[in-house]
Amino acid sequence: MAADCLMCRLAGVRDGDTFVARLSASTVLLDVDQRYRGKTVIVTREHVTDLLEMPEARALELYADVRNVARATRLALAPARLNYALLGNQEPHVHWHVIPRFPGDDGWGGAPRFEPPPTRLDPAAYRELARRLSAAIGESA
């Protein structure tokens, strides 16, 4: 863990309004920005700044976690499409975004947008969405 890394701190989260699950190689949280309802962030629990720095076995575990979250998202929310992003430009720590897409959402048919302002939910709405995804992760594992 890197003391100055936001993602390292998020990887240590074990509860809260946006907490979804701890999986084999990662911690799963709802993205605070819910412009795309159900968008999650899958954060590796070890501080690695590039996917190629990870031992292959650990990278495969992380990939399995991403697939598990994607299946759960499909089960819980029935999006028309799922988008995936592994960027690391703003936070240099390996983390995936799973982004459910629905007809009529912001930029439907194009790439997801990440610029401000974020769409925030009230705490109860985060908790309910996190609960649904967590339950679906249990069902899809």
Image (cartoon, grey):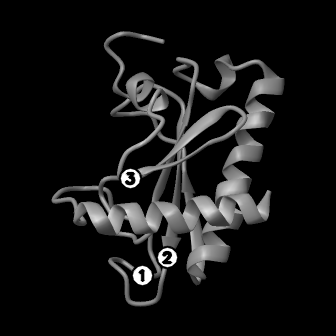
Residues at discs 1 and 2 in contact (Cβ within 8 Å): yes
Q: Secondary structure at mark 3?
A: loop
The answer to whether 99 appears left or right of 36 in the picture is right
Q: Tell me the mark number nearer the camera, choosing from 1 and 2.
A: 2
Q: Tag 2 or tag 3, which sits nearer the N-term? A: 3
Label 2: which residue? Answer: 101
Label 1: which residue? Answer: 108
Using the numbered discs, state the Cα–Cα distance from disc 1 to disc 3 in whole angstroms.
19 Å
Q: Residues within 10 Å of mark 3 (few under 14, many from 20)?
A: many
Q: Residues within 10 Å of mark 1 (few under 14, many from 20)?
A: few
Q: Secondary structure at mark 1?
A: loop
Label 3: which residue? Answer: 31
Specify the quadrant of the image occupied by residue 106. bottom left
Using the numbered discs, state the Cα–Cα distance from disc 3 to disc 2 in whole angstroms.
14 Å
The answer to whether 73 appears left or right of 102 in the picture is right
Q: Residue furthest right?
A: 57
Residues at discs 3 and 2 in contact (Cβ within 8 Å): no
**Residue in the foreground of this view, choosing between 49 and 4:** 4
The answer to whether 9 appears left or right of 69 in the picture is left
Residue depicted at x 48% and y 36%: 14
